[in-house]
Amino acid sequence: MATISNVVTNTCASPTPLLRRRATAMALRVQLVLAVVAVVVPALGVAAGGATLGVNYGQVADNLPPPQAAAMLLRALNATKVKLYDADARVLSAFAGSGADFTVGLPDRLVPRLAADPSAAAAWVRANILPHIPATSITAVTVGNEVLTGNDSAMLRSLLPAMQSLHAALAACNLTSRVAVTTAHSLAVLSSSFPPSAAAFRRELLPYMAPLLAFLAKTGSPFLINAYPYFAYKGDPEHVDLNYVLFEANAGVGDPATGLRYDNMLHAQVDAVRAAICRANYGKAVEIRVSETGWPSQGDGDEAGATPENAARYNGNLMRLVAQGKGTPAAPGEALQVYVFALFNEDMKPGPASERHYGLFKPDGTPAYDVGVKAPTIGGSWKGRANGTSGGAGGLVVAEGPGGADGAGQGTGFYTVSAATHKVKRWRCWESLFATVVLVMASGLCWS
């Protein structure tokens, strides 16, 4: 078997003197831009480390609008981070120049191939990453989805080698500082989740999880968790407090070991993952992100709580928390990055009815439920072209908590997410300029 280092060196190295001279010239230009940015950026008032809204853009449907229309809706949401389950070239091209940061997915079926053949990782990077950067910002690749809780033992063994191959291919193209390699997990990787401080990974998964955590810590990549309080409520609606899972006013739940009090289930689930990671001795080095969470607006007769009203309350209150940059009780100073599931209802998803009704929007671009979205008007027949015109310029407006946006006094009933994004716009312009120069140099080296 060819080694990773041999494959990526042969793929991306520049062997000729002419190309080496070109690379040197590019490097000198980058140094000049670095000097300019170092002087200019501090004067712009860059916002410090707050989280911004992310949205999962799934496409398991036969009636969705084209990516150009999706871009309009995401702008209305002020969603600056988008997560795909593949690396759809149509979507990535449609978002060129948008400033949105993309997480793209490498499908499960390719995991064994990349694990066995490092050249397959280099080929995947050439086909799915290099054509789109720097015009489209790709910041992460997820290798498979919820692989560790699947039933395929070969897939479990292949996951980390595939991630390592992909990271090596990106490193050969000087992209690892911009593109992280990770994978998403379901909460089923935990043997228990309450109280949060007592959580641990399932014993049979530790042989896979421990080295995976070491890889994430070494490469500075985030740990992704798909967390759905809805499932807990659906499974036991008689005993799970609906207000607790919907971020509404409630008595809260305490962790007797830490003394921390939780007023919503999502934060408890995230801190359970945090405790499990810490128990594996990688807690301080790995950031936790919620790669999926949401609430269905419709379900089958036995799916308790799947209503438009509950979906509006869950996603509205969640977005308010994201906009405020709130962390969890165990990490209050760390703004939690969250990706809402999902942008659209997807009519071809298998399973119970709820699976087809997680969208913030219907396929025609109208809101799936009332959270006060001031979105552009898009309409017409989706036959390969975008229709409609742009509408209002407002951001997503979501329901407030009982005491208003700041938790005190009478609320107006709405809270706008827009303000949370204005702080970073000036920085993003300069970041894009710098990224363009750096990534053009990287792309030139890798294509040669």
Image: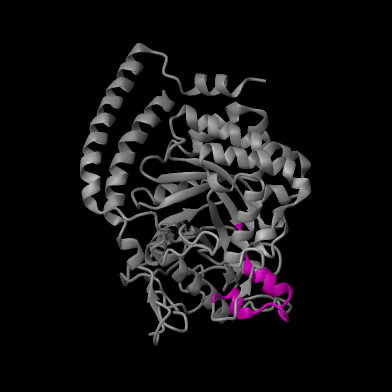
Region of the chain picked out in magenta, as a range = 226-247
Please report the residue visible at 30 percent of the width from the left and 17 percent of the height from the top.
Answer: 21
- Residue 410: x and y in percent read 39, 87
Please report the residue visible at 34 percent of the width from the left and 34 percent of the height from the top.
Answer: 438
- Residue 55: x and y in percent read 49, 60
Q: Is residue 82 above or below residue 12?
A: below
Nearer-the-camera pick, 433 or 298: 433
Location of residue 113 (image quadrant): top right
Q: How many marks?
A: 0
Q: Is residue 389 visible?
A: no
- Residue 183: x and y in percent read 60, 46
Name the colour scheme.
one colour
Nearer-the-camera pick, 445 or 194: 194
Nearer-the-camera pick, 193 or 66: 193
Instruction: Specify the quadrant that holds the N terminus.
Output: top right
Location of residue 27 (image quadrant): top left
Question: Residue extending furthest bottom?
Answer: 410
Question: Residue extending furthest top?
Answer: 17
Instruction: Specify the quadrant that holds the C terminus.
Output: top left
Q: Is residue 75 left or right of residue 261?
A: left
Q: Is residue 118 visible?
A: yes
Q: Is residue 44 left or right of residue 378?
A: left
Q: Report if residue 409 lies within the magenta region.
A: no
Q: Report if residue 227 lies within the magenta region.
A: yes
Nearer-the-camera pick, 279 or 368: 279
- Residue 424: x and y in percent read 32, 56
Q: Is residue 139 above or below residue 306?
A: above
Q: Is residue 18 above or below residue 191?
A: above
Location of residue 385 (image quadrant): bottom left
Please report the residue visible at 66 percent of the width from the left and 32 percent of the height from the top.
Answer: 115
